[in-house]
Structures are given as structure tokens and as C-alpha cells.
Amino acid sequence: MSPRQIACALICLLAAALPARAQETPDAELRRVLDEARAACATTPAPDRLVRILCDGKIRIGVRDYYPLFATHENGTRQGFEVDVAHALSAKLGVEPDFTRVNAANRIVLVAEDRIDLTIATMGHNTQRDGQVRFIRPHYYQSETILVGPRALKVAGWADVRERTICATVGNGSNTDLVSHGARLMLFDEAGVLPEHLRSETCTLAAQDDSFFAAYFADPAFAAAYAPKFGFAQVPWGMAVARSGSDRLAHALDLISQIFHRDGVFLDLARRHKVVSAFLERQQGVWNRADCNTATGATNTACILPALDTELEATSFARPVAAFEKWVKGTLGVDLVLPMLKTAPAWSLFKTGVATSLLLIVGALSATLVFAMVLGAVQGSRSWVLHGAARALTVTLQSSPIVLTLVIASALSHALFPASAATAIGAAIVALGLTNGANAGQAIGEAMATLRAEPATRGLGEAALFSRALGRSGSQIVAFLVNAAKGTPTASFIGAPELLTALTDITSFSSGRITTYWLLLIFYILVVMAVVWFCDRLRLRLERSHAAA
């Protein structure tokens, strides 16, 4: 035979073999994959995770500690739908499960860092996460995010969530939708705390998977007080493994998931824990179809569900930023991530945060100076009534934590004006200015009292005395101006969209939390340095005017 004929014959044989392989059952393919991995374990263990798992006789699985019906950990006992899924998967592999507590913030990180082999933690499969982990197909559950709040609260759609405080969990994929519609997020690591924060009115609404709230709405008291407002972002849930070194493990888990859907294992476990099972009932029908019940069913787009499309609009400079991140990683070995520069929603939040922070700083400095001058003049007054009133106000402010002062200022401003970002910014400026201005005013008042007792200043008018007091208390005034600038991030507690709030919102749907907060630190260091420089110039001017007088 000629070389061309031999090549054609080989191609024909390969083409004939492919359909046959595709028609193999997932059971037969799973046996083949596990036998190969065990053989590798018996000879020379490879870095492949499946080989290591079979060699060690255990699989490290990340599960939640508190997610009713799905995974709970009480009195040393783990139970729930996902915990039983983990046990069933381990048994199918012939190994023991080794559980690790995870939450929405670290469930991907622990897989990527090889601290766990598999995460089963109520994680929605979206297109953003596809670049971070390898999801197991078919998916083992499906849910949507719902907003829950008091029954009397009228919230019917996105227009009603703007500037409302919504409790959510870090890493929840639906946070992008909330932030893009103007909601203010209060983030927590665990979903289990959300109902309590609803009850305490810490937040107006809570956003979480409908599956999470199902257990709470089974409680008549909770159902009487709260109601679902609307749902969005329906997403399939996926188990996930690391993107590198896990090809064989992922393939084995794909096959097991097919088998568990086909044989009703997932369905039976869900019913045992009273988990809503409509999705699993439909999936059982899918995976009993001839075209899906094959060795390659997990790659058949007619059988599997697509990931939720959460790709965000990129900025015009996203590519250079990504290239810079790659250069830093390759050159310095530093994993630099700049999410605020790569997507349009994050960039918009970042710009708003920076602008608001600068406005807050300028406002807080101006308010501090104004209140310092006014309260300093009053505390230096010869009238014991004015002096006593100003002194009482100063002591009260000194005794009150700045966060409490902010909350009180916010409550008063909301009673007088409609709730808005501008109202929150104004309240923060007044609270920061009043707190620091009162302290600076005390220094001015004490300087005036000291000057009155000096022979050289006898006969001076109040204006001249006040001018000299400003010069003498210049260092204290500068110190409280710097303190006002450093205190501006606390405005996030009352909903002001400053940089801390913006970065918190960005990290709720993007990676790079460490880099993001380093940038926050650098920003405030630079700002405070600029404020110190400005205040030093102000102090020198005050001291010169005092010396001239």
C-alpha cells in the first residue's frame, strides 16, 4: 500500500472508533479512568490530583458550615444535601472525604492554592468564574438570587433598590447586578448572618439564593414578617476543581455526576433533606436520554447547561492593564490584580469613589476649620454660659465614638432631607468637622485663657487675643485637620459612596481583594501626606502671624 492509502486507512479506522467511544456508558468510562489512575499510583505517583487522591485514600472537600438544608456543622456533625453529595462522590471514588470549611470569599482561593481538591459550596457557575476554576458538568443544582425584606416594604423591581443598603455575601456573583443598579452593599463572609441582620434592621434588604431562604420561609414567624421581593440571575450550581493538574479528576467527577443524575442519586439526596427538587427531576430525564447517557455526555451542549453570562463590559484600556499585570507577575513574581481598571462598572465605581473621597476630605477639612474657629471663640469667651455650653458639647463629642456620631448625624439628616448619597456625604462632613473642630476649638479656647493670664497681653481686644490664640494652638489645629482627613473612610458606614465603599463593592464581584486594599492604603497615605504638607504651611502662617503680633 502507498503511504497515502495507509494514511486514509488510519483516518477511516479512527473515524469508526470515535462514535463507538462516544456510545460507551459513563460507567465503563469511569472504570477505565479510575483503573488508569490506580495503576499510576501503584508505579510512580504523578502530580495529577486524581492519582494523588487515590494514593492517599482521601479527597479534600470544601463545604460550608452554615447553609440550612445544604451544609451545616453543629456539635461536630456535618449534614445537608451537599455534605451527602460529598460522601456519595467519595464512596464512588473509593476514598474518604476530608472536609474543610469554606465560604463565598475563599472557596475558589482554597482550590487554586491546592489546599482542597474539590469545592461543593453553593457556587453558581458563571462565565467570570470559568477563568478561575474548572466546573464539573453536569451541574448538581440550580437557583436564583432573591431579594428578601419586610412585607410592608414596597420593592417591586430594580428602580426600588437604588441607594438602599442590601446585605449580601462576599463573592456572590449576583452582586454585580446589585451594584450596577445603585444598591449599597453590606458584605458578610457567611450567608447565615443575613436573616439576623434583617431582623435587627442593619440592612433594608438581603440578597441570597432562593435555596438559602427556603428553610427560613418554612418558619411561620419569619414568613409573617418578611417576603421575597423579586428574583434575578438564575444560575446553575457547580462543583469545582483547580484548572491545572485536575484534568483526570474533573473527568471522573463529570462521569460520576452524569451517573448520579441518571440513577436519581442527586434527586434522592435532595428529597432526604427537603430541598426543592424540580430541577433535579428534569435533569434525571435529560441524563437518561440516549444521546446524553454516554462517555462524552458532559461535553454535549444538548445535555449540559450553559454558565450564566456575567461578562462585564471592558474598559478601553483593559488590555494594556492585563498586559501590565502579566508583566508584573512574570518580572516581580507579584500577583497584581487591578479589577477597577478592567471593567466598565468597576471603573465607574472607582472614579466615583475617588471623587467622593476627595470631596469628603476637602469638606471635612473646611468644616473642621470652621467649627474650630467658632467653638474656639465661644470656649474662649468671657461668658460662662457660652463657655459652659461649648465645653459640654466638646466633652460629649470626645466621649462619643466617631461611628456613633456619624450614625446620629445621618439619622438627623435623613429626617430633614430625602435619603441620598449627597445627604450621606453632607452628614459625614458635618460629623467629622464637628468632632475634630470641637477638639481643635478646645485648644484655641485654652490658648486664649492662657494668654489672658499673661501680663504682656493685658489690654488686648478679643480679636487680637483670638488671633494670638490661633498661632499658639497651630500644632493642635493641624493635628485635628489631619485626623479629619484620616477619618473620612468611616463615611462608608452611613452609605457615602467614597473609595472604601467603592472598592468593597468592586471586590464583591471581582477578584484581587488584596491588591485593591493596598491601593486604598496607598491612596490615603498620599492624601494624608498632602494634607500634612498643606497644614504645615497653614501652621507656619499662623505662627508667623502670632510672632508679628
Image (tube, rainbow, N blue to C red):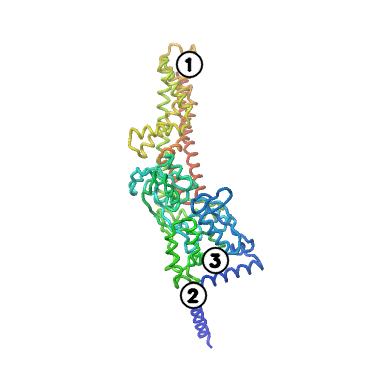
**Amino acid type, mark 3:** Ala
Q: Give coordinates of residue 242: x percent, y percent.
A: 54, 59
Cβ atoms under marks 2 and 1 closer than 8 Å: no
Q: Is residue 449 left or right of residue 35?
A: left
Q: Which residue is mark 2?
A: 23
Q: Position of residue 415 (x, y in %)?
A: 35, 33
Tell me which amino acid carries mark 2: Gln
Percent from the top left, x then y, of residue 528? 48, 36
- Which of pointers 2 and 1 indicates the residue nearer the eye? 2
Which of discs 3 and 1 lies nearer the camera? The answer is: 3
> Where on the picture, by quarter, is residue 34?
bottom right
Q: Splitting the image into 4 quarters, where does residue 417 fall?
A: top left
* Secondary element at tag 2: loop
In-front residue for pair 50/355: 50
Residue under numbered circle 3: 252
Pointer 2 or 1: first along the chain: 2
Residue 148 appears in view = yes
Q: Which mark is residue 286?
A: none
Specify few, some or many for label 1: CA neighbours under 10 Å numbering under 14, 14-19, or 20 or more.
some
Disc 2: CA contacts within 10 A as few (<14), some (14-19) or many (>=20): some
Which structural element holds mark 1?
Answer: helix
The residues bearing labels 3 and 1 have C-alpha atoms spaced at a distance of 84 Å
Residue 141 x, y percent position in the rendering:
46, 59
Mark 2 touching mark 3, by CB under 8 A? Answer: no
Tell me which numbered mark, 3 or 1, is placed earlier along the sequence. 3
The residue identified by callout 1 is 451
- Secondary structure type for disc 3: helix
Query: If you read the primary sequence from the N terminus, does the residue marked by circle 2 or circle 3 appear first?
Result: 2
Q: CA distance from mark 2 to mark 3?
A: 17 Å
Marks 2 and 1, how far apart in space? 98 Å
Residue neighbourhood size for the residue with mark 3, other residues' Cα within 10 Å, grouped as few (<14), some (14–19), many (≥20): many
How many callouts does the rendering have?
A: 3
